[in-house]
Image (tube, grey):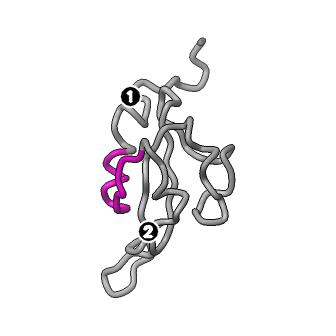
Amino acid sequence: MIYMKNNKTMFDNREFMIFAVTELGQIDFTQVCETSADTVRKSIDETKTFVKWDGDVPQCVADLTTKEGPYTYEEILVILSGPEWTDPNPMQPGTPS
């Protein structure tokens, strides 16, 4: 659920940056909303990930060399719903692998 106040979401100041998983070691997790390299979401092929923050771009994010963005909340929702991030054919429970 997204909370709204005066037609604004709680994510209006939040931004997102996509980058290569190989650069995860450069992220200072005290500067972003994620807590560790183990908790980030990865693309289906596990080559990309993203972080989010509120306010100014953290320096560790600005220093990334493979970055795509920054994106707004609405923009990242569209990106993450695509086939690079969401499996169009997820396995159904009880389906043999």
User: Which residue is tagged 1?
Assistant: 88
Residue 57 versus residue 70 in the image, above or below? below
The Cα–Cα distance between marks 2 and 1, rounded to whole angstroms, is 27 Å
Packing grade of label 2 (10 A; few <14, some 14-19, many >=20) is: some
Q: Earlier in the sequence, mark 2 or mark 1?
A: 2
Q: Which residue is pictured at 34% across the width and 57% down the height?
A: 71
Residue 53: give x, y in percent of width and height.
50, 66
State the residue in front, 44 or 28: 28
- Which image quadrant is residue 65 in? top left
Quadrant showing the C terminus: top right
Q: What amino acid type is highlighted by mark number 2?
A: Arg
Packing grade of label 1 (10 A; few <14, some 14-19, many >=20) is: few
Residue 69 in magenta?
yes
Q: What amino acid type is highlighted by mark number 1?
A: Pro
Q: How many marks?
A: 2
Badge number at residue 73: none
State the residue in front, 97 or 16: 16
User: Which residue is tagged 2?
Assistant: 14
Residue 55 versus residue 22 in the image, above or below? below
Residue 25: give x, y in percent of width and height.
64, 44
Question: In this view, which residue lies farthest toward the bottom?
Answer: 6
Residue 60 in magenta?
no
- Which image quadrant is residue 72 in? bottom left
Write down the region rendered in magenta: 67-79
